[in-house]
Image (spheres, rainbow, N blue to C red):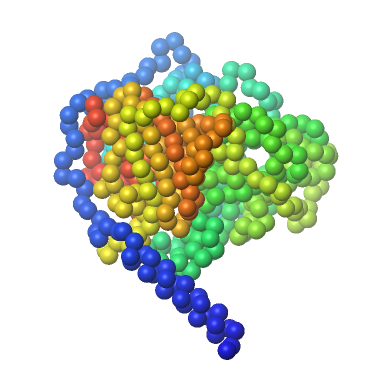
Amino acid sequence: MNRKWVGSFLIILLLAFDVWLFFNSPFSTSKQTLPAEVKKDGTSILDIGNQEAGSRSVKKFSLTAQEKEWQINADKSVSAWTYNGTVPGEPLRVTEGDFVKVHLKNELNVPVTIHWHGMILPNQMDGVPGLTQDAVQPGESFTYEFIANDAGTYWYHSHQHSSKQVDKGLYGAFIIEEDAPAYQQEQTYMLDEWAVNQDKQNLTNMGGMMMGSMSGDGEADTKQMYDTLTVNGKSGEAIEPLKMDAGETARLRFVNAGYQQHRLVFPEGSMEVIAADGEKVASEGSSSNMLEIAPGERIDVAFTKQGEETEVIGEDPQTQNAQDMKIPVVSESNGDSYAYNQLSVSSASSKVTGTSSGSEDVLFKETPESDVSYHMDLSMGMDMGEGMVFQINNKVFPDTPLIPVSEGDVVKVRITNSGRLNHPMHLHGHRFQVASKNGEAYENPIVKDLIHVKPGEEYTIYFKASNRGEWLFHCHDNNHADLGMVTIVDYQSVYSPFKLGGENNNQP
């Protein structure tokens, strides 16, 4: 029998099996309409958690959402949506304890917001349209005010139709510095991916998606959707070199603003993880030289330049379009002498992730007794009217089961991924403690606000319901969130006066 014919036949059988799985797994038959009435009992979120400057130092910023043609490199440009005309928007830097005021003006022809990713702040400042505010309409403004607690690496981005708006560039870094920084030099790198030479693929077209799913790494969708990787809005030779002398150590803050996981390879012995999601990690002297960063995640490393020769921090060469994501590390003496096409990324011996090291400060010293337990099953399905959907407990937002809590509750969430794609799950307004993976307890628990759940994996997390409000818990591959993978941590004593959709077109 012809081998090529046999191979084609096997592929057809695999695709047919995938189709059977999609249509025989639980799925919602249609996206239900938005609830007709919003809960009105208790206290409005506008009346809780208000913060004032008092005697604190006040830091003021102005951000204008506007459209601009953005040059990714000498050969590629994109029509971007920006804060203040750049991608990413300007990094906002404050000192721990500052009172922050950010005035947002919208010059786009669509509504926008700003969400302060990873920040513990009052619910009404969280930037989620239809839940914590109305989206800021074209020509209008909104001012966000909050105290910058907890030094660390955070970022800001639009949460209005974010599968599109963050994808088009509406994001920037938000850094809360310690009073006495531990490193003399530091840099922030925001990683992203763009569809430059192609139209962005539509996830609801499942045919190509299923073909890609056979790769088994959980990244089939992003591999098809994007063709260009960027660092701080630039690609390839346009990426600005990092200038350091041999033996010098710098703090490098990495933020994954895209929807694809990235694996960065460092020179051997040059990198140690020092923080994840704004939380310091317990130092273990890791010798790994590959760092995996999930969508929405932030990981800080201490990087030491190994010699005077030019080095490179770059995407794992096995990743599609990896050549776009290379950061040259040069000495002052040879900063202009390197040849980009001679830079190469060596293979990595092992990898570290945002859960590889325990946190210095934990939320619970022992596994706590829970007041609320919630099983969050993540899956894919087919909706007869919408195509592919991404589900929590076989439902799509806004029909996903809420997580009902009362102030002071200890909440246990067991998250399982029974689908075929990766899901970085992000909780607003709280930090949680990762207690176990696949039923095996961590010896050193990790405190985070985002957990990357790959196909077949299960994590158990705990958090304290200590910040009243209505808070999203969603997949930070916003393409998945857009197709349903969103729920709400719902404090029983409060309500939101805002509505999804409506005249303000609130689309969280």
Q: Would residue 1 be found to the left or right of residue 407 on screen?
A: right
> Measured from the top left, where is residue 347 in percent x and y?
72, 53
Q: Is residue 159 above or below residue 491?
A: below
Q: Would residue 94 be found to the left or right of residue 316 on screen?
A: left
Q: How many numbered markers are drawn?
A: 0
Q: Is residue 249 above or below residue 161?
A: above
**Residue 488 visible in the shown view:** yes
Q: Residue at x 65, y 58 (%)?
A: 318
Q: Nearer the viewer, residue 153 or 418?
A: 418
Q: Nearer the viewer, residue 257 or 353?
A: 353
Give the quarter of the image for residue 187: top right
> Measured from the top left, where is residue 246 in percent x and y?
81, 35
Q: Residue at x 68, y 47 (%)?
A: 350
Look at the image and tell me in which quarter the N terminus lies.
Answer: bottom right
Residue most extreme to the bottom: 1
**Residue 476 visible in the shown view:** no
Residue most extreme to the top: 55
Q: Nearer the viewer, residue 443 or 144?
A: 443
Q: Residue at x 17, y 32 (%)?
A: 40
Q: Would residue 440 be found to the left or right of residue 344 on screen?
A: left
> Measured from the top left, where is residue 172 in percent x and y?
51, 38
Q: Would residue 165 be found to the left or right of residue 154 on screen?
A: left
Look at the image and tell me in which quarter the C terminus lies.
Answer: top left
Q: Residue at x 58, y 53 (%)?
A: 229
> Measured from the top left, where is residue 277 in percent x and y?
52, 34
